Image: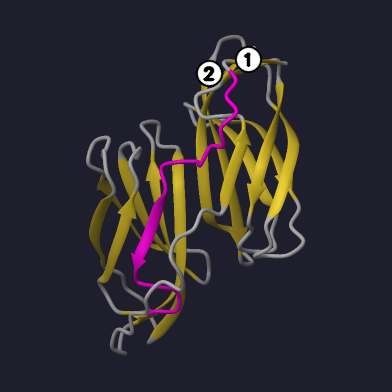
Amino acid sequence: MTLLTPQQEITQPTPAVSILSPGEGSVVTSPIHLSVEIQPGADTYLRVAVINGSNVTIARQLERIPLNPKSTTTLDVLIPFEIPTGSSKALLTVTTLDEFNRPQSLRSVPLTLSSTSPDKILPPDHPETSWLTIQSPSASTTISGGKFQITGAVTPITNNPILFELVTDSGGVIGNAFLSVSMAGKSMDFDLPIYYNYLSIPRDVRLVVRQTAGKYLNTVILDSLLLTLEP
């Protein structure tokens, strides 16, 4: 394995997106008034989805992100929905997408959807903090040899494994690894290998790190780094 242009600084995966409102446990009626904060580095679109307790997406929309924002950007989005009952549990997910429609960063919040009760909007439980730090590889590193080490620290938010995936510009997953979790909320250091499939030419690849929750294993948090992989 050959690692070119190595860098030693710690990398905070970007861009990050934070949900400012509604907070976890809020009761919302249609349309949901979503307020999000987007850090510099977001590429093209913001994808918003509302997923009900049966794992059915009942609302989805795309919002254009201001091109390559140089400073933190706040977006307000109205999300209409319909439910057949008076209330329903749901997961609201917000994802920034790159130019190849790959997820860059995802945040989520559980809500109660209501067709009758008034809104009860709660604030975020706590300020957004980084759940993931990657020591190596650094963003934009070029890697060859079919294998490399991923090192860093993570604070899991559920007890499900942390998933590491290598996603190409065409959307294919050419390598993956996972990290077992012993306790949600407890910081863990990691140093694990990830292998990728044979390549004949260099590929633009996004290292996606994510965690799931619930019986349907919905992704509830995700961040990523852009890499170049060579044969």
Q: Residue 224, image x and y in percent?
A: 51, 40
Q: Position of residue 102 (x, y in %)?
A: 45, 37
> What distance separates the C-alpha of mark 1 from that of mark 2?
8 Å
Q: Dot 2: what SS? A: strand
Disc 1 element:
loop
- Of 63 and 9, which appears nearest the observer? 9
Q: Using residue 150 as the reference point, say whether residue 30 is left or right of it.
A: left
For the view shown, which residue lies furthest in the bottom direction?
A: 117
Dominant secondary structure of the residues highlighted in magenta in the image: loop
Quarter of the image for the N terminus: give it. Answer: top right
Q: Is residue 217 at all visible to an observer of this figure?
A: no
Residue furthest out toward the top? 200
Residue 201 pos. (x, y %) = 56, 10
Q: Is residue 8 magenta?
A: yes
Mark 1 in CB contact with mark 2 (< 8 angstroms): yes
User: Could you tell me which residue is drawn at 71 percent across and 48 percent down?
Assistant: 189
Q: Which residues are magenta?
A: 6-26
- Please say if 223 is above or below 89: above
Relative vertical location of residue 183 with respect to residue 94 in this rendering, above or below: below
Amino acid tagged 2:
Arg
The residue at 26%/68% (across/down) is: 80
**Residue where numbered disc 2 is placed:** 203
In-image side of 213 versus 192 (left or right): left
Residue 186: quadrant of the picture: bottom right
Residue 187 in sight:
yes
Count of marks overlaid on the render:
2
Q: Crowding at label 2, few (<14), some or many (≥20) Cα neighbours within 10 Å? A: some
Q: Amino acid at mark 1?
A: Leu
Question: Which quadrant does the C terminus fall into?
Answer: top right
Q: Residue 227 magenta-drawn? A: no
Q: Residue at position x 28%, y 88% from top?
A: 118
Q: Which residue is mark 1?
A: 199
